Amino acid sequence: NANTTTGQVVRCGGPPLLCPPRAVAALGHAYSRDAMDITGLSEARIEQLREANLLHAPSDLFRLLISSSMEEDTFHENNNNNDDNDNSHDHRTMQDQIRELPGWGPKSVQNLVHQATRVATDGISLQ
């Protein structure tokens, strides 16, 4: 195409976690071997979790550790404060939501929970 200009680069100058392509790369780095060392989270899976509105910041991974009873208590507390009884709240845990995504299953989610638990319990190496 004669109208195509070559050599131009489009750059997003906003915060890395707000620009989807940069967010995937930033989260990939946060979960990489050199950082949190979370195995099983490829950039494709990170993108899938972002598109499902489950992952936006590195700390979101630790929501996997919230028990369903804690989420249920929060739901009921929020619902009791809502007079219109809007049933649009999602009752499922983050684990349930991930398990329902294509390519994920109980074992994949269990492995991810194990990785998050390991980091939450042991911390990360600062070497």
Image: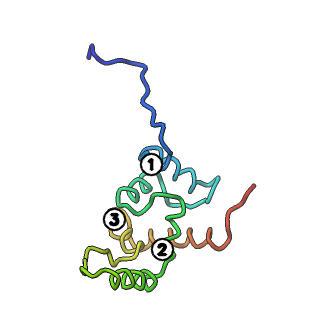
Q: Position of residue 5 (x, y in %)?
A: 35, 17
Distance from disc 1 to disc 3, alpha carbons, whole Å, reads 23 Å
Q: Earlier in the sequence, mark 3 or mark 2?
A: 3
Residue at image x 53%, y 69%?
62
Residue at image x 53%, y 59%?
58
Residue at image x 49%, y 64%?
60
- List the residue tagged with mark 1: 18
Q: Are marks 1 and 3 in contact (CB under 8 Å)?
A: no
Of the two numbered discs 1 and 3 in the rendering, the one whose residue sits closer to the viewer? 1
Disc 1, SS: loop
Out of 72 and 114, give the one closest to the viewer: 72
Q: Which mark is residue 101?
A: 3
Distance from disc 2 to disc 1, alpha carbons, whole Å, reads 28 Å
Q: Position of residue 70 (x, y in %)?
A: 46, 83
Residue farthest to the top, as pictured: 2
Residue at image x 50%, y 68%?
112
Amino acid at circle 2? Gln
Amino acid at circle 3? Leu
Out of 89 and 103, give the one closest to the viewer: 89
13 left or right of 51 in image: right
Q: Are marks 3 and 2 in contact (CB under 8 Å)?
A: no
* Other-residue count near label 2 (Cα within 10 Å), few / some / many at <14 / 14–19 / ≥20: some
- List the residue tagged with mark 2: 110
Distance from disc 3 to disc 2, alpha carbons, whole Å, reads 14 Å
103 left or right of 40 in image: left
Q: Position of residue 90 (x, y in %)?
A: 32, 74
* Other-residue count near label 3 (Cα within 10 Å), few / some / many at <14 / 14–19 / ≥20: few
5 left or right of 22 in image: left
